[in-house]
Amino acid sequence: MNMDLYLEAATSLVADAHKQGLEVYASGFANDVPASYNYSYDPTAEYLQFIDNSQFSVDGVLTDFPSTASESIACLGQNKNVTKPIKGKTLVISHNGASGVYAGCTDLAYQQALDDGADIIDCSVQMSKDGVAFCMDSADLTGDTTAITTFMPRSTKIPEIQKESGIFSFDLTWSEIQTLKPQLSSPFPDGGMPRNPANKNKGSFMTLSAFLELAKTKAATGILINIENAAYLASKKGLGITDTVATALSNATFDKQSTQKVLIQSDDTSVLSKFKNVTTYQRVLSIKEIISDAPTQSVEEIKKYADAITVPRASIITTSGSFTTAFTSVVNKTHNANISVYVSVLRNEFIALAFDFFADPMVELATYVAQVGVDGVVTDYPATASAYIRSPCSNLNANLPYTILPVEPGSLLSLGLRDVQPPAAAPAPALNVADVVDPPLPAVISNVSTSTPAAAPAGKPRSNSPKNVANMALSLVAIMLISLLSM
């Protein structure tokens, strides 16, 4: 590995030692110490580099995390060419493509996601000022593009969309957007874990039609189309995003086939209603706020509009001070109503993982997939999720000498003295019926005002308006507990 944290050619040390009848043990493995960018923050990828490559294989490893080494050897080694079962397995859904490897929503990110085994590739649809639909995580271009360097004077504040000022796609023409470069950014800007710098500005933006063509050409298992801000775009910008998406899907004949899955996702039930006439589409309600329960009445209301829901990780497993504490009943209650559940967003960086997972994204996957039984995982790193799901260890009922065990929430925290445990976090609210149903979409206006965007009109708030702010900071007492556990 060079000074820039990229792998270089392997030395001949192992081969030379083996020729002399010597065994070689590699040391220095630790899940919570960033290694090469080539590993995409997946600790199992580093082990496999030493035990499962075409040039050499060491005879053993010395590690701070023996369970991760064991799963790499027993579950993932010699498993690269295994075909993932299609039926009865959790879907691997990309989050802006393989956005942990390339800038999200670029051609390279989508191709990487497919190469890495994603079942479903996703496009969050945004609209340009001149009505071109394209894929981008947010309507605000400041995070995922170089828009700040060119279009800072276009920055505006739109309370209906976000609290912060932004440079929004619908204020720029498609030709202007094409002058920008994509930007690979980390969701943990202060965490000291940047994503692959060599790929920072690589790739090209994709129109919705180009995305659909890619999915058809590469025979993706399916696609997820995410639609947000439809009411604002229609009433303030004269842009009909739902009609644009429906037309694009029809032009690509996705409404006339059932070979490839089509998931239509939105945080707005009125958007989902626009697609109810195409029975082959699965409608997915995005519930962004953390919830602790899904009462029967709320689930019944969801059933009127959606076949599935996407929820944050904390709506399934609660945490306190970065320790897991309990499972919620959200998955069981929605499954009882025959509603699928997708968990979002899974990331490899160990600072995104609760302590119980021992800085191992495979253990988190095992907990959500094998223990909880979610129907899909939305991830920045499809390669990691796909490697777990296609491995024999994803089946807890298989008779294997070793498997990847899920965690039992609260078990690690219970090992510490009660006096030094982090204070219990206030429970998240249950999902109310009022949080589910949205007002009908307004008509698309024909004349667009060029004045400063107006504030949100009074009246019923959006069902998924933010109600909770999660405190993810690690408390001092949590750190003390970890110190006690390591003694």
Image (tube, rainbow, N blue to C red):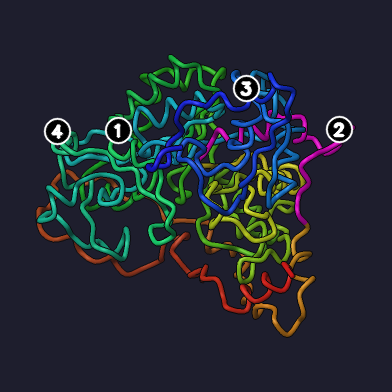
Task: Name the main secondary structure of what is drawn in magenta.
Answer: loop
Disc 2 marks which residue?
398
Disc 4 marks which residue?
175
Disc 1 marks which residue?
202
Q: Which sits earlier in the primary sequence, circle 2 or circle 1?
A: 1
Mark 3 or mark 1: which is in front?
A: 3
Q: Nearer the viewer, residue 446 or 172?
A: 172
Element type at marker 4? helix
Element type at marker 1? loop
Mark 4 or mark 2: which is in front?
A: 2
Height in image: 26 above or below 406? Answer: above
* Residue 404 inside the magenta-drawn segment: yes
Residue flagged by tag 1: what amino acid is it? Lys
Tell me which residue sits at (54%, 52%) in the image: 33
Magenta-colored span: 380-407
Q: Is residue 274 visible?
A: no
Which image quadrant is residue 422 in?
bottom right
